[in-house]
Amino acid sequence: METMFGIAVDGVAYGMILFIISVGLSVTLGLMRVVNLAHGAFAMVGGYIASYAAQGAGLPYAAALPVAVVLTVLATLPLERLLYRRIYGSANELAQVLLTIGLTFVIVAGINYLFGPTLKRIPLPELLTGTVQIGSKAIPAHRAFVIVAGGLTLLALWWLLERTDFGIRLRAAVDDPAMAAALGIRTERLYLATFALGSGLAALGGVLGAELLPLEPYYAIRYIVLFLAVVAVGGAGSIFGSAAAALALGIVDTAGKYLIPSFGEFFFYAALILILFRWPYGFFKGRTA
Amino acid sequence: MTMAGRTASRTGVAGAHPPPAARRDLGWIGIPLVAVAGLAAFWLLPDDLALLTRIAASALFVLSLDLVLGYGGIATLGQAAMYGTGAYAAGIAAVNWISDPFALLAVGGLAGGLIALVTGALILHAHGLTLLMLTIAVGQIVQEIANKARDWTGGSDGLSGIDPAPVLGLFRFDLYGRTAFLFALAVLVVALMVARRIVRSPFGLACRGVKEDPLRVSALGGSPKSYLVALYAVAGVFAGVAGALTAVTSGIVGLDSAGFPWSAEALVMLVLGGTGRLYGAVIGTAVFMGIHHILASSDPFHWMGFIGLFLIGIVLFLPGGIASGAGRLSALLSALARPGRDGGRA
């Protein structure tokens, strides 16, 4: 019973981190149809900035987090103008894969050059290092914080996409970019804003998840498969799909590691194949499909 | 919008290819050229034969990816599943039962082809990101099985103790790797000839048809999926032979031979060289691994930064890969020469 509870808490927390990072990828894939393999690198950049802000500049966690998100967005926006804009659209799949792999390599090399190959930590404030009592159970405060943050992100995104002007334009552009442009929606600006949203979410997840997905230069390559898996299972462009997929895969992966640790990632990928075999377009057939 | 985008990209791809006549000429020259270049490297770089052998075996692997991607349009990041299966099958066979190098290649090819046939039939209904993920997942599962089956594969320690018999009973695998390199080069050249036959056969043309327009192929009575599965299996044989070739010439098989990074690297090498031209695979592999050998000896991260910039540059400025550079250059030169010649006449 204790194990089940532990699996549930860790699995949900892990799933929430996967969700926060992957939903950014899902939104950019849904709108711009770009398979951004550098998304993991953006998350890593966010984590490293937070780590530097907390350890090098001495900022508190609560300040390091927004600083990391904002700086990551500012750092990645020029990439949208210079690189990504040329490869939007599903016809450029191969070019997207190569360009973003290339970008990932450059970022990995740059991070290693600046921060070295060792593991970096983001020191947690005292508030997050203890445990939280829920009924008779105690769960680590950091896990609880991550779960709450994931839930808030989900709500905020839902509100942004379903209830705001920006969301209406974005959904229109996803459904039919040419028509949206003809109706006076400035799709280029929309792409820029969505790209910023995507890399901001990546950075947020990178910072929040630094305890679960440790920060080191190969982070960008090691975890991108996880994020892509979530997007493929959830359906590109679907927020609730991403959340469901991230939680399902997070729990499957955690359960596999707890119960049958010797089989490593086997269950994760077996589940992935089974799910994609049954639902080739993901749980929630993405808006693009 | 989507239609316009697709049409534009298709004409873009068609425009990047040299005209059919030019491609036929290049095809005739290519195979002896690879053989001559290989032999020249054999004489010029006698100290780097281990690297050259790896390049030849990897070029065969990248060639298999070119069959899948360049001629079938299947975007995959899991080609190493077939390579790893072939390598392990040949390695296990060599340790336990047989030692003839050609028999080992056959075992590897068979294993690679079988796994490709089975997984291809399961996953090739998908497209785009879903297909990418499925191919990655297949590769990861193969790697995980190899990791678990310690008794057979040696797990994370790798499989060692592969000691193949002399080639044709005459040429022993010597300490300097001379036999290994010439053997690998010969296999690569034969594989290039076979691959050329395949892509120019009616089957190869049908696969290219599926790549260009699956809807039209099915309207003509063909089954796009079965063509793709067959192509995937054929390429799996090539990848399996490549894995077996690596196992035979290097004597060891590691877990990374089935890993995602190796699949991704193969894709990078292929696109560096140029897809859909067969020789692009050889050029890309030689360039990639050659530069890697030079740069990574100082610091692997320098290498990553360099290859990353190189990739971005290729996508932005030379979308057809290095092999298209020659065609583009000659087109540019003739475009430059024509006005000049006209001016001279006037």
Image: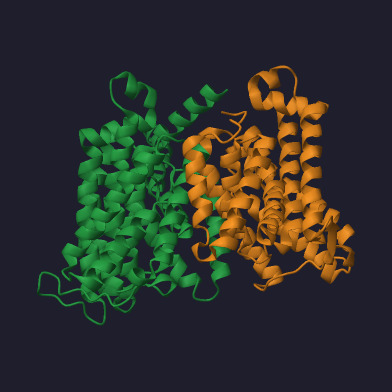
Chain colours: A orange, B green
Q: Residue at x 80, y 55 (%)?
A: A144
Q: In which quadrant of the rendered view does residue A233 lie?
A: top right
Residue B154 visible here: yes
Establish if B332 lies above or below A117: above
Q: In which quadrant of the rendered view does residue A257 lie?
A: bottom right
User: In the displayed structure, does residue B12 sit left or right of residue B68?
Assistant: right
- Residue A217, how many percent across, how many down? 64, 65
Establish if B39 lies above or below A201: below
- Residue A115, how many percent across, how many down? 71, 70
Q: Nearer the viewer, residue B279 or A47?
A: A47
Q: Residue at x 62, y 38 (%)?
A: A29
Residue B77 visible here: no
- Residue A201, how many percent across, how many down? 74, 47
State which quarter of the image contains the C terminus of chain B. top left
Q: Nearer the viewer, residue A133 or B165?
A: A133
- Residue B64, how many percent across, how many down? 32, 50
